[in-house]
Amino acid sequence: MIRQQKAAEAEAERQKIKSEKEERIKAYKKQRLEKTKVISKRTQRGQPLMKDRMQLLLKQIEEMKKR
């Protein structure tokens, strides 16, 4: 009976870790997609939009300062 209880607790812990990992991966993919959208914007002539790139760099610098 004690073994079953410990096994159930261990399984619950594994499921919790797995769900947390999936959430981190999902958040990373969302962040990556957002960054790719900003970087890939172009003008009609095919030149990159620097305004969006500068905003992205400013955001990264501000995050680094917070750490």
Image (cartoon, rainbow, N blue to C red):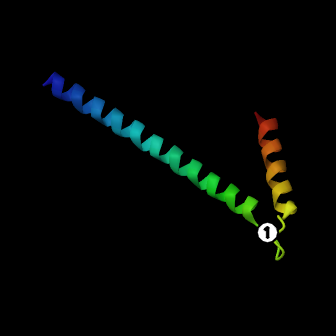
Q: Is residue 33 above or below residue 18?
A: below
Which of the two residues, 60 or 8, is positioned nearer the viewer here? 60
Question: Residue at coordinates 81% horizontally, 70% vertically from top-left?
Answer: 46
Total numbered labels? 1
Residue located farthest toward the top when viewing the structure as drawn? 2
**Up-down relation of residue 51 to residue 19 (above or below):** below
At 41% from the left and 36% from the top, the residue drawn is 17
Q: Amino acid at mark 1?
A: Arg
What residue appears at the point 82 percent right and 49 percent down from the top-left corner? 57
Residue 58 placement (x, y as % from top left): 84, 49
**Residue reaching furthest to the left:** 1
Mark 1, residues whose alpha carbon is within 10 Å: few (<14), some, or many (≥20)?
Answer: few
Between 36 and 55, the one lying in front of the other is 36
Q: Which image quadrant for residue 33?
A: bottom right
**Extreme residue toward the front, this view:** 45
| Closest to the observer, 1 or 33 | 33
56 in relation to 20, above or below:
below
Residue at image location 56% in from the left, 50% down from the top: 27
Residue 64: x, y in percent?
78, 37
Q: Position of residue 62 (x, y in %)?
A: 82, 43
Q: Nearer the viewer, residue 48 or 23?
A: 48
Q: Quadrant of the C terminus?
A: top right
Residue placed under numbered mark 1 in the picture: 42
Q: Is residue 24 left or right of residue 33?
A: left
On-image quarter of the N terminus: top left
